[in-house]
Amino acid sequence: MNRTFKDIEYTLVRNRRKTASIYIERDGKVSVLVPEDLTNRQIDDLLEAKRKWIYQNLAEWQDLNARRVQRDYVNGEGFLYLGRNYRLKLVSDLAEPLMLKDGYFCLRTTNGAVPDADAAFKAFYREKGLVRIPPRVDYFKTKMDVQPKSIKVQELKNRWASCTPGGNLNFHWKCLMAPLTIIDYIVVHELTHLIHRNHTPKFWNQVDKVMPDYQARKDWLRDNGAGMDL
């Protein structure tokens, strides 16, 4: 549900949660998640109390997204994989639509055109995600004594990852552009939601137990996330 409080436009989601949370999504939109029984007046009071925080975080989002890049599918363009930048090479005789070969992203062309380039990159990241992410989940779930039900790599719009109420973990294919240390942070973040659903102090204390330098990794993702796109 889309609502407006004074000059703040936001999306309201009611669900079976115990506390209210406000998020600035990766696209710069404000999301407000509240318990089902919270009144509209109480929601307005929450937004009023958090108005300064919302303004500050929206301003920060605008600064960070000034770094957003526009990539073109041309020879020499740089594309990210596991934190490294690889140049693109257009190739006509390639067995697969996209391959990481000899230090280049090699993209298959047809008569000089690359009509399926976007789909080829997304498929590459999904495939690599299904190879790279499950072992990291297995490693950390043992340390944290939790058991997710499934792992998927897909399009998640404005989130890096999500943990469903049923215990399913979903990761955005864009995560594969980040270094492995950052992927580990995203994995630990979502596994912690199997213990604490909301971002309370208990949630962050649990993350800290597993990953004491999580704040540096979280900051890296905040500062560099805008550049992790096609």
Image (tube, rainbow, N blue to C red):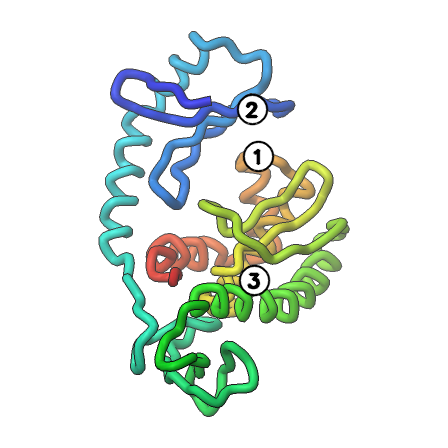
Q: Residues within 10 Å of mark 3 (few under 14, many from 20)?
A: some
Please name the amino acid that badge 1 sits on: Asn
Residue 146 visible? The answer is no
| Residue nearest the viewer, comparing 166 with 96 | 96
Where is residue 135 shown, x and y percent of the image? 69, 67
Please name the amino acid that badge 3 sits on: Asp
Where is residue 41 shown, x and y percent of the image? 43, 8
Give the quadrant of the C terminus.
bottom left
Residue drawn at x 28%, y 61% as measured from the top left = 69
Where is residue 33 shown, x and y percent of the image? 51, 27
Q: Which mark is residue 184?
A: 3
**Location of residue 45 with respect to 73 vertically, above or below:** above
Mark 1 or mark 3, earlier in chain: 3
Mark 3 or mark 2, earlier in chain: 2
Residue drawn at x 28%, y 27% as measured from the top left = 52
**Location of residue 154 with respect to 120 vertically, above or below:** above
Q: Which residue is mark 1?
A: 198
| Residue nearest the viewer, comparing 76 with 86 | 76
Mark 1 vs mark 3, CA separation in Å = 19 Å
Extreme residue in the front direction: 111
Q: Which residue is mark 2?
A: 19
Are the residues flagged by discs 1 and 3 in contact, CB closer than 8 Å?
no
Secondary-structure class at tag 3: helix
Are the residues flagged by discs 2 and 1 in contact, CB closer than 8 Å?
yes
Mark 3 vs mark 2, CA separation in Å = 27 Å
Please name the amino acid that badge 2 sits on: Thr
Secondary-structure class at tag 2: loop
**Location of residue 88 with respect to 200 vertically, above or below:** below
